[in-house]
Image (cartoon, grey):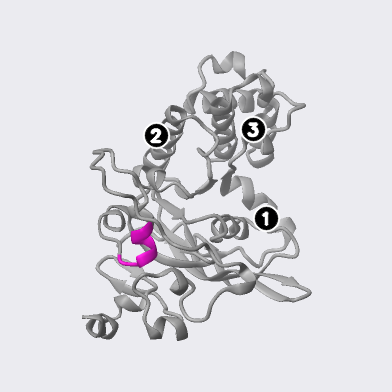
Amino acid sequence: MPDAPVLSVRNLRVEFPTRRGTLVAVDDVSFDIAPGEVLGIVGESGAGKSLTGAAIIGLLEPPGRIAGGEVLLRGQRIDNLPRELMRPIRGKRIGMVFQDPLTSLNPLYRVGEQIIETIRTHLPLSESAARARAIELLTEVGIQGADQRIDSYPHEFSGGMRQRVVLALALCAEPELIIADEPTTALDVSIQAQIIQLLQRLCRDRGTAVMLITHDMGVIAETAHRVAVMYAGRVAEIGPVREVVKSAHHPYTRGLMGAIPSLEGTGDRLTQIPGSMPRLSAIPKGCAFNPRCPQVFDRCRIERPDPIHVDNSDVACWLAAPQAAEAQR
């Protein structure tokens, strides 16, 4: 019997009430993440990736709110918990890594003080034991001379080293789940590779589940076990990363794959997806991708597709429905 998922998201809906009506930013999103698994969440800016992460850990900016669905951590529902009960879960059971490490680190305090405070908030350790654990964590994330660097301020670290400190901070209380929101975007390519290897090692050695949010399909292909492709607040396709990269079923996913340059340099033109992501106030009827889709047909403009299981993936596309596929032949 496979391990029970660390995180289960069921039909999640995030809304933003405005004077002109309610905007739906995340619409009926569902997925699981198993222990030791990296689930990549990929899509263009505005697809709803970061909002999904913020909703899971209870950090939605008002007036944003969860308007439907459930978020379960090891079977326990957490989306409806009051703030004072959610705060100890965030940090202890769920770690968070943001794109800009300076948003997670206080520039006025030494990094060691911040890590030690976090450790002692969540674990019953003395000051000296917490300091020893902080040095261990800094060493584990690849900071050399951690016993000296622990007394440095954030500005004394490079961008890549600061991101390692943030990872150490996220790991303080040995969380079951890490949500990493664009953790490599602001870093050099060589540093990106090191952070990716670090995340992979944490999954393998600790059995930590990771939700990796990024717009970079290359990072997903290198790091994730499964990938969820988001478009206009919905999951367009979710499945094993190798299968999605090699034989995507959704036209949007195929467009994303076709936009990745090949290392072979065959000279083939990259795919361009015409148009842009719709505004939340102007999401079209039926499939949200239909105005940009090269294979659109009448049903796509009228009915919104629910996920259809094809091979090992779930695809929200009418082309994946047997009767639609027959009609297109």
Where residue 83 appears, as percent x and y from the top left, is: 73, 58
Q: Nearer the viewer, mark 2 or mark 3?
A: 2
Residue 67, visible in the rendered structure:
no
Which class describes the residues within 10 Å of circle 3: few (<14), some (14-19), or many (20+)?
A: some
Mark 1 vs 3, N-terminal side: 1
Looking at the picture, does residue 102 appear above or below residue 203?
Answer: above
Give the camera-side residue of 257 and 221. Answer: 257
Mark 2 surroundings within 10 Å by alpha-carbon count, few (fewer than 14), some (14 through 19), many (20 or more): some
Q: Amino acid at mark 3?
A: Leu
User: Label for residue 39?
Assistant: none
What is the three-letter code of the residue carrying label 2? Gln
Q: Amino acid at mark 1?
A: Leu
Query: Circle 1 — which element?
Result: loop
Q: Which residues are magenta?
A: 249-255
Q: Main secondary structure of the magenta part?
A: helix
Q: CA distance from mark 2 to mark 1?
A: 27 Å
The answer to whether residue 20 is above or below residue 79 is below
Q: Which mark is residue 197?
A: 2
Give the mark, 2 or 1, whose residue is nearer the N terminus: 1
**Badge nearest the viewer, 1 or 3:** 1
Instruction: Please name the residue that numbered disc 3 is placed on.
Output: 125
The reply, left or right, for residue 207 in relation to residue 88 is: left
